[in-house]
Amino acid sequence: MNSIGKQVLNALKNEISEIDYQRYVKQLTYDESESKSNIAIFRAPNPLIANWTRTKFAEKIAHLFEIKTGIKPSVSILVQSTAAQTLQNTATNAIVERPSGGSLLNPSFTFQNFIVGDSNNFAFIAAKNVSEKPGVVYNPLFIYGGVGLGKTHLMQSVGNVMLSQGKTVIYTSVEQFLNDFTRHLSNRTMDRFKDKYRKCDLLLIDDIQFLSNKNQIQEEFFHTFDALRNENKQIIITSDKPPKKIGGLEERLKSRFESGLVADIQPPELETKIEIIKKKCEINRVKLDREVINYVATIIENNTREIEGILSKLNAYSQLMGVDITIEFARNVLKEQMAEKRSNITTDLIMDTVAKELNIKPSEIRSKSRNSNIVYARRIAIYLSRSLTPNSMPQLAQYFGMKDHTAVSHTMKKIQELMKNDEDFRIKVEELSNKVSMATPE
Ligand code: ADP
Ligand code: MG
């Protein structure tokens, strides 16, 4: 009988590409002795494979465990190494939950490793100030922005500063907070729950938008929040949108969230992306020349999280083939990556998703109707098709029944401008984009 971890990896094999399996997943081993029913630990031979499998497959692995055992564990993919190193290497994005329910911070999420540019300057300075005067300057600090723009990195930077000063830091997601709450409630140990969350020096709650429509936990969080703030303990919150745009959230929580400082992070400019890539190369000890770095910067979209996957891939290939990473080499390797990433998203899928979300018929999107709702949906569908599929502007013009490619180009400019100037609109488009990606059979 195979261990449960092995069974899960076998099941995963059927859900991912052969290349992904052979290159990454096959290299993982399940650590049976360290794993528990709610914590699944895997070992990877090096940090790149650990980071990459964590980013790409941890969620799927957790889900497969849930199917097999009924319990969704937190999945940790650690580098095979000594115990001390293991602690150092834990999680890039994911956080390893200790059995006690506390969390470790990613040690590389520091202010020194954070690249500052116009897009994130404000949030960076705010976080830096908070780390120097926790509980005093801005409480709470609320950081919001799109996926992969460095929110978790910044909040954990404050956490790492305070941790090094011997302070008690809790990093948690809404889900972990909720699980912890439910567990203590059913064990009748609510006093321990209160003790834990109300006695820390710094509480980091990541992705607070998930509080939306969860009433009981909103109530509990509200009391935790007030208790901490009354004692001048620092709270930092991140979200994909500003407080007032979070639906299904009690007004009193919204106003609490706004009562400190609300700081946004915008997508990085090209220069900032380049610097972030250089930094990631340095941390992961990958050598790339300037030309390759610039190339990588132009192909990643706004989500900086892609960088580590790309570096991992370049590094793996060059080691496998024993060649240097030249620009031609990078182009070849990443061409496949771009195709892989996008192959599942089609214009049809985008049209269907947008139509469904905006309550119109897919056929209306391609019609000549000038009805404002339909025009709105059509523009968004065109924008997403251009951003998420390899289709050219002339191809899209044909698909959407437009005059020619200049009409598509005009729509693209219009949408980009709107996204820049209208927060609501940007959030809407990003949500749609996420929905399209999720609607994709991976
Ligand atoms: P978010 O929480 O906003 O989705 P993360 O904080 O998880 O994003 O960041 C995604 C990845 O990108 C992390 O590896 C992080 O270190 C990196 N990153 C994002 N912004 C920066 C930055 N300004 N400087 C250095 N690394 C960054
Ligand atoms: Mg995050």
Image (cartoon, grey):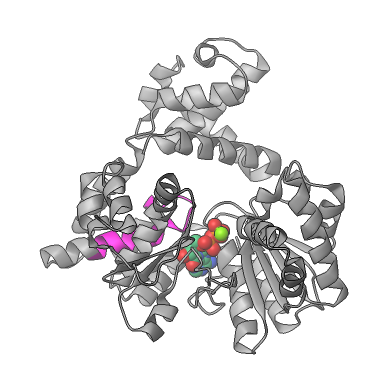
Q: Name the residue at 21% across, 56% down.
A: 23
Q: Name the residue at 56% across, 35% down.
A: 432
Q: Is residue 344 above or below residue 421?
A: above
Q: Can residue 117 be seen from the camera position used here?
A: no
Image position of 203 (left or right of 291)? right
Image position of 435 (left or right of 167)? left
Q: Name the residue at 73% across, 42% down.
A: 213
Look at the image and give the residue range highlighted in magenta.
299-315
Q: Is residue 83 above or below residue 35?
A: below
Q: Can you give x and y, in whole percent of width and height, for residue 276 in the image?
A: 45, 67
Q: Can you give x and y, in whole percent of width and height, for residue 84 in the image?
A: 40, 86
Image quarter (top left, top right, bottom left or bottom right) of the C terminus: top left
Q: Can you give x and y, in whole percent of width and height, for residue 408 in the image?
A: 47, 26
Instruction: Looking at the picture, tell me which residue is in the foreground, 354 or 406.
Output: 354
Image position of 107 (left or right of 414)? left
The residue at the far bottom in this view is 165
For residue 11: magenta? Answer: no
Image position of 284 (left or right of 119)? left
For residue 313: magenta? Answer: yes
Quarter-wise, where is residue 441 in the image?
top left
The residue at the far left in this view is 322
